[in-house]
Amino acid sequence: MSDDFHDELNKDQSEIMGLLEPYLARMQPLPHEALNFYLKDYTPAARAELTDSAVANDLRCHTWHGLKRTFAEEPGFHFLKLKGNLEVLNIRDQLILRPKKVNSYGRHRNHASDQQYAYDNQLPIPGLPREAQRLIFGYEIDPAYSSIVRVIFRRPKGRWIAQVNEPAAEKRWTDITPAELPLHGEGRAKKRG
């Protein structure tokens, strides 16, 4: 990738994370609280019967309700439920957040619906402001489902990933976007003729 492209991605990330920065200290604990609720308030028998996808869905629901409890009175925060059960937080028509479990690469797994494709690719979705940047508010869970490894914000389709640091940390977020290999043909010597 060209340096100009990386500069544009960094500018994009800095601007978006700058909009989120005043709220990060209140957002970062929410997935941790959701997991603690699951671990402490679900009975061992109930936890034993749940599949990984059921646990992931429950944690997403508890994180979503944590967002509602924390930000329902915040001016410009709108909690939306759209067709297809897409639940998102619209922040001042600038940012759209969707809580999701992510893997160590910051990627979420979903049913490959047209709506999910549109969300990840910033395509129009009825009920969402077109100009708002869509993000995944992600949380990585350890394999034993005993702790949250990290909380991230990710621009879908691999654009960038920002890890949200502990509320007491000096820096609120850190860029953890993995370096990418050059695209096919970039950085290769030309064939001699």
Image (spheres, rainbow, N blue to C red):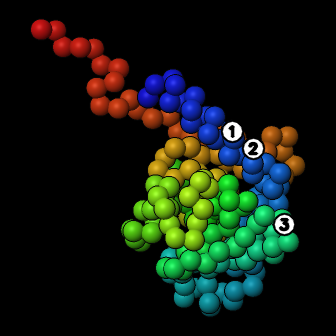
Q: Position of residue 47 (x, y in %)?
A: 61, 84
- Earlier-in-chain disc, 1 versus 3: 1
- In the foreground, 105 or 90: 90
- Is residue 181 visible in the rendered image? The answer is yes
Image vertical order of residue 18 relative to residue 113, above or below: above
Q: Would you say 16 lies left or right of 126 here?
A: right
Label 3, label 2: how far apart the Cα atoms are: 17 Å
Residue at (40, 32) in percent of width and height: 181
Q: Position of residue 168 (x, y in %)?
A: 87, 49
Label 1, label 2: how far apart the Cα atoms are: 6 Å
Q: Amino acid at mark 2?
A: Gly
Question: On the image, numbered disc 3 is attached to which residue?
Answer: 74
Q: Indicate the quadrant where residue 137 lies.
A: bottom right
On residue 18, the disc is: 2
Asked whether the beta carbons under mark 3 and mark 2 sit within 8 Å of each other, the answer is no
Q: Amino acid at mark 3?
A: Glu
